[in-house]
Image (cartoon, grey):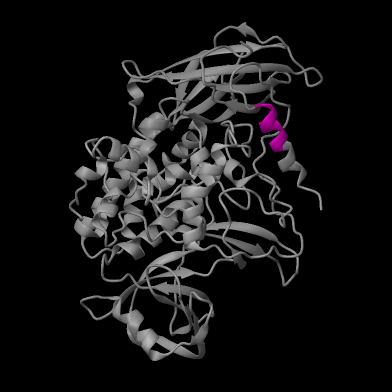
Amino acid sequence: MTRPAPLLALLIAALSGCATTGLRRYPLAEVMWEDADQRRFRPMPESFYSPYMWDGADNTFFRPVSEFWLFEPSREAVNVNSVDEVPDSSWFQNRLSRRLMSPEQVAQGACGERFDIPGPWTIVGGKPDGANPGFQIRDANGQRYLLKTEGTRQPWRPGAADTIGAAIYHAAGYWTPCNRVVHFDRDILVVDPEATIERTNGVEEPLEQHHIDAVMEAALQLPDGRYRASVSRFIEGRPISPWRYEGVRSDDPNDVVPHQHRRETRGMVVLAAWTDHIDSRQENTLAAWMTEDGADDGYVRHYMIDFGDCFGIVHEWEYLVRRFGHSGYLDFEHVVTDWLTLDLAARPWFVAQEGPAGRTLGYYDVFRFEPDAWRPGYPNPSFDRHTERDAAWMARIIARFRDPHLAALAAQGRFHDPVVERELARILAGRRDRILERYLTRLSPLTWPYVRPREEGGSELCMQDLATWSGIRDRATRRYSARAWAGDALEPVESPGLTRSAEHYVCAALPDVAASAADPTYVVVDVIAQTPGRETTLPARVHLYAKGPGDIQLVGLERPSSVEAPGR
C-alpha cells in the first residue's frame, strides 16, 4: 500500500526547506491543515507489551549509550506546515490553538458539553495495573469506564490531576479520554457475575468480594458518606497497545514520520513541564484501531492517557519527591556532578517546600520552575530532540490558556478546600507565564497571519502578537517595524506602513507590485515586535504571491534565527 501523498509532500518540503536563513521559497499552494494519515488499511497492527521497567532502563541506560555513537545532528521537526504549525492528524487536532474556546469548553475536555453516568454502575472487571486500584464499570446506558480510587497517601490530587490534565492536553490538541472526578454512594455499584480480574502476570481469576473491599478501603470517604473516585471513559476505537516516542510502526502504512521527529511529540515537553507530568512515557499512551460500521479495515489513532501524576505527585521517598521535575529517577548527570562537587552545588530540590495547598499539591510550585531545566522521570526520546521552534510552538498554544480557563480547569478537581483550587490555578498561571517569558521573547510571537483588503485600497497582512495577547508585554509600549522584498531577486521595496487592530493584531500594508495570475510576483514581508528596554524578538517572515490587484495569496510563515534579509 502506498504512503499518503500529502504527507510525503509535507515531508519533502520540510526536508528541503529546513534552513532558516538563506533564500527559501514556498510553492504557490494552499496551506496544509490536514495530514492524510487516516487512510484505511488492513489488517489491524499487532499489539506489543510495554513493561515499565524495560522502558525506563532502555531510556536511562541503553538508548543514550547507543545514540552516543550515532552522532545524530540536531534537526527540526518534519511534520510542520508552511505557516510553522502542525496539521490535524491521527496524532493531533488544532483546538484552542486555532479557535477561541470558552473556559467551560476547555474544562469539559473530551467529555463534551453533557456528562452523565446513570446508575447502576456494574463492575465488569478489575484494574490490575497502576498506582491506584479500581474497577472497570458499565453504566446504565452500556458505556464503559475505568473507575479509580485515590488511595490515602495524597487524597484529592490523583483524581483531580487525571481530570484536569486530560482536559489541558485535550484543549492543547491531543487525543485524550474523557476523565471526571465523581462522588458516589457505594450502593450504586453492582457486580457482574462474570466479572474477572487479570493480574499483571497474565493470570485471570474471578472478581470476588474481597477484591471490591480492598479497592473501597483505599477510597476517600466524604463527610456525607459518599466515596470519591475518578472515572475515565473508554476511548473510541479498539485498543492496540501503547505507541512509542521514537521510530515508526512497520505495520501501519500511514506512519511515515519517525515519532521523535514529530513536532507534537517534541513540543509536548513544554506541556509536560507546565503540568509537571513526570510520567510522560510510552506506557501512558495508547494506539487505537478506528473502524466504521464493523468494517475490518481502519486506521490508528494515537491517544495520551493517565495524567494522575500531574501537579505534585508524592511517593514514599521524600528525597526523590523533592527532585521530581528537576531531576530524573536515576539522573547520572546530577549524580556525577553532586559527587564531584561533594554535594555543594545549589539544587532546586534543596529549597523545595509545600505551599498553601499543603500535601495535596506536594511540591508543585512556581518559584523553582525553569522551563528549560524541567526533566521527566526518565529520558524521553522525543523530548530529548525538541528544538527552540518546537518549544515555541507549544508556548503559543499555552498562551491561549487565560486565567479564566485555568480557574475553570481547577474547579474540575472538586477539591474539598477552596484554597487548593485557587492555589492550583495560581501555580498554573505562574508556570504558564514563565514558559511564555522564555519562549515568546526570542523567536517571533507573531502568529496566525492572514491577508485582508484595506479601506483605502490595496491589501494588508495582519498577525496576532501573543506576547501582548497573553499579557507578558504591555500593548501600549509595544513597537513594531516592517520591511519587504519583491520579485525573483527579492529586491527591497518601500517599507510597509503599520497599523494595529482589535485582539492584539498588527497589520502591515502590502507593497503594490506588478503581477498577474499568469505571472505572479513573489513577496516577502518581515514584521518585528519590540518592547523598548526589553528584548527585540526575531522577525516573523511571511511569504506571499501577488497575483493581481487585490489578489494576494499567503503561502508561508517562518521564524528566522537571525535578522538577515532573505537570501543573505
Quarter holding the C terminus is top right
Residue at point 54%, 9% (across, down): 495
Magenta segment: does it hold 448? Answer: no
Bounds of the magenta segment: 10-17
Residue 87 vs residue 512, the one in the foreground: 87
Residue at point 60%, 36% (across, down): 70
Q: Position of residue 59 (x, y in %)?
A: 49, 50
Q: Is residue 301 above or below residue 270?
A: below
Q: Specify whether 326 is left or right of 343.
A: right
Magenta segment: does it hold 12? Answer: yes
Q: Specify whether 473 is left or right of 79.
A: left
> What number of labels is visible?
0
Residue at point 71%, 42% (across, down): 7
Q: Specify whether 70 is left or right of 28.
A: left
- Extreme bottom residue here? 193
Q: Specify whether 276 is left or right of 140.
A: left
Q: Quadrant of residue 345?
A: top left
Q: Is residue 99 visible?
A: no
Please name the predominant secondary structure of the magenta segment in the image: helix
Q: Position of residue 553 (x, y in %)?
A: 68, 26
Residue 35 vs residue 98, the one in the foreground: 35
Q: Is residue 468 above or below residue 176?
A: above
Q: Is residue 339 visible?
A: yes
Q: Position of residue 113 (x, y in %)?
A: 47, 62
